[in-house]
Image: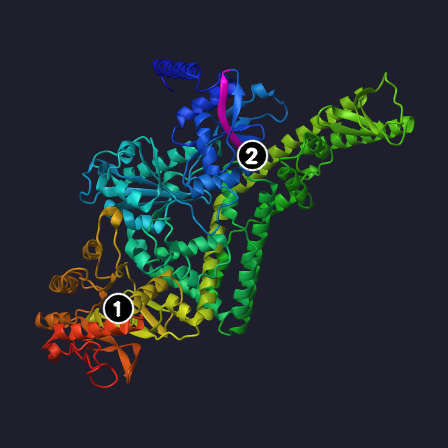
Amino acid sequence: MPSRSLSHKREHAETDTVAAENAEFARAVKAGQVPDTALSRIVYDNWKRFPDCILLTQVGNFFESYFEPAIEVAALLGIKLTSKTYKSGSFPFTGFPIHQIDKYLKLLVQDMGHTVVLVEEEKDPLHPQPVADIRRKVARVVTPGTLLDESWLSGHESRYLLAISLGDAVNAEEGGEKSPLYLAYADVSTGEFFTKAGSTADIEDEMARIAPREVVLDNSLREAWKEGEAGPSGLLELLRVLGVHVSFAAAPATSPSPPSPVNLERDAISLLRHHLEYALRDRMPAMPAEGEFNRESQGAQMHIDAATLQALEIRHALRPGGLVGVHSSPLSAKGTLLSVLSRTVTDSGHRLLKRTLTAPSTSLAVINARLALVAALHEREALRTDLRDMLRSLGDVMRIVQRFRASRGDASDVWDVARWVRGVERLRDRVRVDIVIEGKRRKDGGQAEGVARLQELVDAFAPLLELADGIEGAIDETRLPGLQAEEAGEEDTAEEVLDRRTQARWWLRPSFSLELSELHKRIQSLTRKRAKLEARLQEEYGASLTLGTSARWGYVVTAKRRDVLPKERFHAVAEAKSTRTYAYNEWSALGARLEESYAELGVAEARALNRLRAMVVERAPTIQANAEAVDELDVAAGFAQAAQDLNYVRPTLDDSCELQIVNGRHPSVEAGLMAQARAFTPNSTHMDAGAHMHFITGPNQGGKSTLLRQTAVIAILAQAGSFVPADSARVGVVDRVFSRVGARDDLFRDRSTFMLEMVETAGILRAATPRSLVIMDEIGRGTTLHAGMAIAYATLDYILTHVRCRTLFATHYHELARMLESGGGVRGVAFFCTDVERDGEAFAYAYRLRPGINYDSHAIMAAQLAGMPESFLDVARRTLEALEGGEEGHGERDDRGEGGSGHGGGVRAVGG
């Protein structure tokens, strides 16, 4: 409990703050910046509290923006800028109806990356307040990483908010040595929370894997960010390059010096929690305790660095057009591994597939469990088809649960939870049928691997039928559309609202609670009295008389002008061409009681909705466990469907450092060729202790890069638990996949193509282990011939002598082969090449790999295929002959057609 002196200090501080705000507002009024009204005081104070945000204030059925910010808001949203006139003058003003808030939040937050502050009215449905007395408060600070239940959110996309706890790295010099850090990240819309230890050296790779929508840093870095500094270990510069939204939180520091991993994790979680509380406020869902976060260990997943995720086009395909960041425009999903492989039918299953492809498992038990399930579903087409049809009907239940945790969500959401529970039960029953049938077929009483895995799947689903029973017993499904229509009528007139309220169909069964039962009885009694009163008055004064409501006059009686009603009982309030409207005390009193009862019923149903939401939240851990099993089933069924559609086979995985692929194919390239009715030329890869490095030469456009990429992709697919595009594959578990392929630059960070290549190569040589897989293409280009060869040779030498990992090294520096031989480095190296096939003047690429070294790059052939003018080709051939001079004895007769038989004459077999 705080001490008396501390309480006094806090009270004085709050008093001082209020006094300062009053003085500042008074100065603004005096200067003519704002009018002196209660509303403008609220708007002005929030404007100063959130100076870098878009401020939207609710006024009745509109969100409005005032004063100077209104000019920016109108320009951003493309809406009309007008003005409001007060005694002190006219001031800029703009706004839009409340029902358009989702449309404009998408534009401001998702599309433009702004932070939006929503100031909403607080209303009591049982005690309406005058407009002047309505209180307003900041309901939410909307940022890209804290979106919760907006209608425009894509179910296929995770929206991670990432908090980074830097520890001592905050005080490290820019670009210094790597320092430990901790990551805590969450998708608040689905309730997924993760932590992971790392270092500043790995942060770019983690950013590429997680792809956060927003990053939260400690407040101590705010000024460095504003000043454009690179920050500790270049972190702030990296975030600028990636174009990610950055926020700052003032979380209490708990880490001692030097910081321990436990305290770094605590700090990261604290940053995440504080930012979510700041943004979501009353809508903040319950977060798991520190020990309940999903802690990702370093070695449990295959590490795929940022350059490799990009080069292999796992999640995004590169398109020309500038810098490639976490969410920048040059990225596309078309032609990616994800797009080729995806057969998931649920949103949550698709999100799991993305996570799986970007961070496959390194655990043989985990990998083989998924492969067994994929195999079981691959073998059972009827079961797979039925399950995928059932999965399609399941909603994204964890997003509903998160809405409930944030005290959001309506009766339709509750009903959807019950439907989801029933759907999961049908999945279980369908799998059980197959297990029983299979058991009857087997005479030995045992279980095949697939059946055992299906049984594990059935056992993973915990029973939730009592939850579905409770929801179905509470909600009358037939009345839900009426509720939705009421919620959608935000622009109705007051008269329509009053009419609808008296005719409403309520979605909860009266038997759900005693309170609801009593209210329904009261309303039924009052409704009968209304009917009797109307019938009596019609009998007395004419059949045209009706009881109704008016937006202006409240409860009224309407009659034809010809029907004369006594003035002592009926007070005329309005007149039309053929009717008169009257106030009638008996109906006004009865109508008020009826309206009050409906209001009480609305409040009672809101309380009942809270109870139902609490029922669901109470069972959230079980729902989440079942949802994870559903996602696993969706991914496995999708893998099985892809295997059938694309002719993939089940790989074998073990603890060796070998990689044996027979007739492997590149998934994306093969899909592209299939669309053109062309066949893909497969290639095999056999890597073991005697040949863990493959040295590959061949012509430009001859398929070397495709071979490199397909080998890495097959390893990733195998460890993701998918079947693979090959005749057979045996993969020794890979801990890290690295690539140095493709030519590009990084102008933002002042890195040329060559410099970027050196940075990425240095990272590979530092981080690769004997269990890693490295693919390298054209190391050493972009500088002089001899310097490039020296760098390429040093790279080969370092991998062979220090790392000794599985490596595919493609190059046009065929002289490196002789250098390796003379340096004694041929041991552990196998030499392969591609070539071209000639038929007179015609030629074609022979994509099939074979042993040997190809001394011809056939670059001029590639230029000819590209459509270069004939005069250009003649000059190129003469220049090449002059440059090569007397070196023909080494087989360097590029593109002149002077070699031997059908393979260009430049291939030499090398032992090894």
Residue 91 in the magenta stretch? The answer is yes
Task: Label the magenta part by its dominant secondary structure.
Answer: strand
Q: Residue furthest front?
A: 871
Front residue (pair 63, 94):
94
| Helix, strand or loop for disc 1 | loop
**Three-letter amino acid code at disc 1?**
Glu
Check the image and report above or below for 539 versus 651: above
* Residue 284 can be seen in this image: no
Q: Which mark is residue 658?
A: 1
Q: Is residue 825 above or below residue 174?
A: below
| Image quarter (top left, top right, bottom left or bottom right) of the N terminus | top left
Q: Position of residue 15 (x, y in %)?
A: 40, 14
* Quarter occupied by the C terminus: bottom left
Instruction: Specify the quadrant of the image occupied by residue 906.
Output: bottom left
Q: Is residue 619 left or right of residue 650?
A: right
Question: In front: 107, or 267?
Answer: 107
Query: Residue, x 62% and y 23% (percent of image)?
Result: 128
Q: Nearer the viewer, mark 2 or mark 1?
A: 2
Which structural element holds mark 2?
A: helix
Query: If you read the primary sequence from the N terminus, does the residue marked by circle 2 or circle 1 appear first?
Result: 2
Residue where numbered disc 2 is placed: 98
Residue 660 screen position, x and y as percent? 29, 72
**Classed neighbour count for the residue bearing mark 2: other residues with Cα under 10 Å, few (<14), some (14–19), many (≥20):** some
Magenta span includes 557: no
Question: Is 29 situated above or below 270?
Answer: above
| Location of residue 209 in the rendering, given as x and y in whole percent from the top left corner | 34, 51
Q: CA distance from mark 2 to mark 1?
A: 62 Å
Q: Which mark is residue 355?
A: none
Give the magenta range.
88-98
Quadrant of the rendered image containing residue 685: bottom left
